[in-house]
Amino acid sequence: MAPLPVIKHLLRLPNVHLLQRVGHKAAAAFGVQLDKSIPVVHGDLDKLPPNIKNFVLEKQELCQPSAIHICDGSEAENKKMLAEMVSDGEIKKLTKYENCWYARTDPRDVARVESKTVIITENERDTIPKPKEGVQGTLGHWMSPPDLDVALKDRFPGCMKGRTMYVIPFSMGPVGGTISKYGVQLTDSKYVVASTRIMTRITPRVFDLINNGDFVKCLHSVGCPKPLKRELVSNWPCNPDKVLVTHIPAKNEIISFGSGYGGNSLLGKKCFALRIGSTIARREGWLAEHMLILGITNPEGRKKYIAAAFPSACGKTNLAMMEPTLPGWKVECVGDDIAWMKFDSEGRLRAINPENGFFGVAPGTSEKTNPNALKACMSNTVFTNVAETSDGGVYWEGMEDPPKDVTITSWLNEPWTLDSKKPAAHPNSRFCAPARQCPTIDPDWEKFDGVPIDAIVFGGRRPKGVPLVYESFNWQHGVFIGAAMRSEATAAAEHKSKVIMHDPFAMRPFFGYNFGRYLAHWLSMNKSGRHMPKVFHVNWFRKNDAGKFMWPGFGENSRVLEWIFKRTDSKDHSFSSESAIGLLPSQDSISLQGLNEAVDMEGLFHLPREFWLEEVDAIRKYFDEQVNDDLPQEVAKELTNLEARVKKM
Ligand code: GTP
Ligand code: SPV
Ligand code: MN
């Protein structure tokens, strides 16, 4: 039993669950109105469409902020908030660059927290496949509606006390675009407002476009009401013990507590654009995917678009912005993380980038590896958990040699030198930069109905056995390749070791519904009259016995893109030869001209029989244990076929 004062406190709360069931009109009748002691310090609540006003009222009654601020996304508003954060010691200005800012987080809040990320549905099976008897499911986390009520009541009452609640109207995709969707995020974090202003399009026009219709409701709190119960670390408000990131597809609602970091708090990103997005996409017949989108133009001036899914921290941003080393080729960036794709009336798959900025991994970004990302983040950028230089700049592992004549302070706020045992920047430290600042941003990146996609590429970090590139035999085999994806764990989430994890479609942390049904949805895309993109798998990360990468990667990946480009043109098997796992490039069809270093192409394409027999076993075990009865028989058949081919190797 809860102690009495807690119960009394709960009784004063609106019954959130009930309110949502009875709808907004009735909610107003229940007497949810603005607490007179909460001033609206910016914007006019009465001018909001009634459903949005009710959403705000309901949540202010629950969270009890000290003020409400309706964001307009303007420059003036941003300036003022940045200045407030500086004076509160939450961020610093980086004087070396133009309008750039630096935040250090509490070291307990540095990445997405997959174990605390849940989907709420009436039936568990709507969220995750029922795993085989005695096996722990790994394809997402489910929570029941009553358990959600309990969890929310434990966290949200009064959680914004002493803080301002910001109301952010935002668009995912160009404002007014045919594939775009709208959301309203309530948050008590200025850092989240400033970052969301970069990552999405914040504008009051969104209120008009929603026009009392559907929108995605997002509620976020760092879970640190004032007066504070503990001293903050690095002035970064968060509540690591109580982190919970929840999604309610039936209500298009996201509720997140306790973390200020990345995908936990910038709710437009993984929560909306992928988890809720994939449930909307399934209902409406399109795809919401963890994919970059790039345009590639050959020396003759012909252009195609490619979408590619790699798991977190596996090279999407780098590929999307790459500078091809192959002479005459051009790559342009539409998006670096998320693609929303829909077949048009002519049967062409068209994609938009729902985001407006890059939340990119900083370490490893250099003039050599990704000059365009570096250029994109030299102004109007928020850096988080990188290291700081004494001349007001930033530093991270793999950037360049540490600048001379300056001292470096690590992300942990400790003096740092090359001899330090700890990294200068956290491995998941990030830059948050406007997409339009990428020098190679595609001219059509904001096209209302998207760009036409010719190829879909899957990939991951596979140190052993998986060739540089191969092509699927057909769409169904391509869906199987996506389903069978595996990759080494990275620092983008809380996983600590470098184990090879199954990460189907690079979506394992981001599925909004049962993965088996997701596969069926992908299979159902293949309809007569549609131009189905060709499907490929790439691996930049194969290592030799000395543990060194066998492929130079980065701009040299253009050699692989050239082959993919040629293959999308071809109606037959030109430039390719059949193997047990798919179509491999035929001899000399990948150009090596001008490569600076010798590359062991034979090694990069070698298919060890033992490895692939084990791979087949691992995939079978995964499908049996994790997807179980929800595995579409088409995908099971592809595995049987692969096994038969591998056995003949
Ligand atoms: P998220 O934003 O987490 O979804 O990551 P991402 O998929 O966009 O990964 P990103 O491009 O930021 O790359 C992550 C890390 O992989 C960086 O440290 C890169 O330097 C490294 N990387 C990217 N491409 C290559 C490559 O072709 N070869 C090698 N060896 N490393 C690469
Ligand atoms: C990822 O983890 O795939 C990211 C970073 O893109 S986050 O926004 O934290 O999800
Ligand atoms: Mn990502």
Image (tube, grey):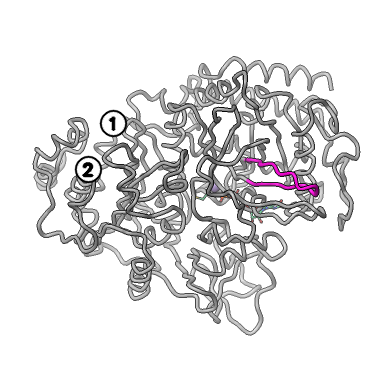
Residue 408: x percent and y percent? 57, 76
Quadrant in the rendering for residue 484: top right
Question: Label 2 is placed on what type of residue?
Answer: Lys
* Quarter residue 105 falls in: bottom left
Residue marked by disc 2: 153
Residue under the image location 71 percent in, 34 percent down: 536
Nearer the observer, 572 or 58: 572
| Mark number displayed over residue 145 | 1
* Residue 548 visible from this viewpoint: no
Give x and y (percent) for residue 348: 61, 31
Percent x, y for residue 413?
A: 48, 72
Number of residues whose C-alpha sits closer than 10 Å to that of mark 2, classed few (under 14), some (14–19) or many (20 or more): some
Instruction: Say which quarter of the image contains residue 23.
Output: top left
Which quadrant does the N terminus fall into?
A: top left
Total numbered circles: 2
Residue 463 shown in magenta: no
Q: Residue at x 70, y 51 (%)?
A: 331
Residue at the image point whose x is 64% and y is 34% from the top = 485
438 lies above or below 587: below
Q: Amino acid at mark 1?
A: Pro
Secondary structure character of the magenta stretch overall: strand
Query: Could you say where residue 281 lies in the image, as x and y percent from the top left?
Result: 46, 31
Q: Left or right? Give the position of 298 relative to 321.
A: right
Can residue 52 be seen in the rendering of this structure? Answer: yes
For the residue carrying disc 1, how many other residues have a C-alpha within 10 Å: few (<14), some (14-19), or many (20+)?
some
The stretch in magenta equals: 294-308
Looking at the image, is 6 positioned above or below residue 126?
A: below
Q: Using the image as rendered, state which of residue 371 and residue 636 is in the foreground.
A: 371
